[in-house]
């Protein structure tokens, strides 16, 4: 579970460090909230299936970035890769 937390925090740090070209965008704000909620739930040691559902929401938010206005596609692809790794880790735990 520690690796899942570290990956979620990595994503959060990337979002804070400039990966979002338009942080005021509604979809961008929803993504940031979703990642923050995921980290909170990890700290609360929620069930892996609940956490996996939260990661799926993060993935949905990332997939909503269909153009380069809110986030560069390379950054989006990198965060999607890490999100999918998190989901795979949670599946192996549950």
Image (cartoon, grey):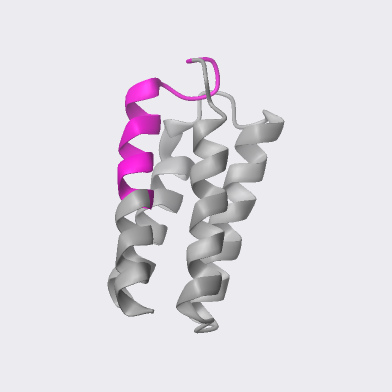
Rendered position, 6 above or below 63: below
Q: Nearer the viewer, residue 18 or 78?
A: 78
Residue 20: x %, y % from top left: 50, 31
Residue 54 horizontal side relative to residue 72, left or right: right
Answer yes or no: is residue 1 visible: no
Rendered position, 91 above or below 33: below
Dividing the image into 4 quarters, which one contains the C terminus? Answer: bottom left
Instruction: Give the main secondary structure, helix, strand or loop, of the magenta stretch.
Output: helix
Residue 74: x %, y % from top left: 32, 25
Q: Nearer the viewer, residue 17 or 2?
A: 2
Rendered position, 71 above or below 44: above
Q: Is 75 contained in the magenta span?
A: yes
Residue 28: x %, y % from top left: 61, 35
Dividing the image into 4 quarters, which one contains the N terminus? Answer: bottom left
- What is the magenta range? 68-83
Residue 49: x %, y % from top left: 50, 73
Residue 56 horizontal side relative to residue 7, left or right: right
User: Which residue occupies 29% across, 55% down?
Assistant: 85
Asked which quadrant contains residue 76, the reply is top left
Answer yes or no: is residue 84 visible: yes
């Amino acid at each position: 579970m520690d690796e899942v937390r570290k990956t979620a925090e990595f994503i959060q740090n990337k979002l804070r460090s400039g990966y979002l070209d338009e942080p005021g965008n509604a979809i961008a704000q929803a993504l940031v909230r979703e990642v923050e909620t995921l980290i909170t739930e990890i700290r609360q040691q929620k069930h892996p299936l609940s956490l996996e559902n939260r990661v799926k929401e993060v993935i949905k938010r990332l997939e909503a970035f269909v153009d380069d206005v809110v986030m560069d596609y390379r950054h989006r692809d990198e965060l999607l890769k890490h999100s999918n790794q998190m989901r795979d880790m949670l599946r192996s735990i549950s």
